[in-house]
Amino acid sequence: MRAVAPVLAVLLPPMAALAADGRPGNFGPAPARDADLSAASLGACDPGSGAASFDRISACTDRIRASGPSAELYIARASAYADSGDRAAAIADLSAAILFDPDAAAAYALRGSLHLKDEAFRDGLVDLDRALVLVPNDEQTLRTRAFAWDALRAYPAAIAD
């Protein structure tokens, strides 16, 4: 038992820091949520804010810690991660956004396009199909799915999209 105490002393501080991130599944109480979380209220976290991707990531992380996680914040931070080139972190945030809001078409569409960039066409098409079920005839999602069909040489499906 005495040997376990030093190991716990090493492991517990990183676990506490991990819990502060606000990601689903982490330890610790969930912070209170914002009642109104529109794109205009995202501030520097907003993809259209013009802030650098690192600043947007920091702003979104601060908002998640302060007001609690939400699909909108995870989508905004995923967009910043994608802009910075960290597709794995972006996909993780989009998956978290989908856990918070299974009907978040934007999360499916963005995650699908990121899968396509990684040449994971099957996963990308599944997400794009789900986004189109939620928001039929979304022009950008249809264009992205057409690209995927074209890359797979499924030309009739690409033309249909």
Image (spheres, grey):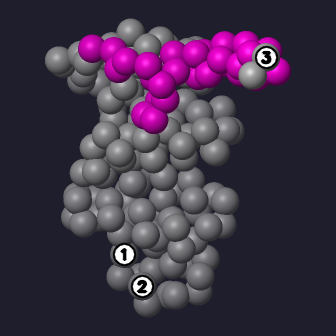
Q: Which one is in front in this view, the residue at disc 1 or the one at disc 3?
A: 3
- The image quadrant where one finds the C terminus is bottom left
Say what amino acid the circle numbered 2 marks: Ala
Say what amino acid the circle numbered 3 marks: Arg
Residue 55 percent location from the top left of the image: 58, 14
Q: Which residues are magenta?
A: 3-32
Q: Residue at x 67, y 38 (%)?
A: 86
Q: Which residue is mark 2?
A: 157
In this rendering, the answer to whether 91 lies above or below 142 is above
Q: Which residue is mark 3?
A: 2
Q: Residue at x 37, y 18 (%)?
A: 29
Can residue 24 be seen in this snapshot? yes
Residue 26 percent location from the top left of the image: 49, 29
The quarter of the displayed image where residue 66 is located: top left
Residue 37 percent location from the top left of the image: 24, 21
Say what amino acid the circle numbered 1 marks: Asp
In this rendering, the answer to whether 8 lies above or below 84 is above
- The image quadrant where one finds the N terminus is top right
The residue lying toward the viewer, choosing from 100 and 20, is 20
Q: Which residue is mark 1?
A: 161
Q: Residue at x 43, y 41 (%)?
A: 96
Q: CA distance from mark 1 to mark 3?
A: 64 Å
How many neighbours does mark 2 have within 10 angstroms: few (below 14), some (14-19), or many (20 or more)?
Answer: some
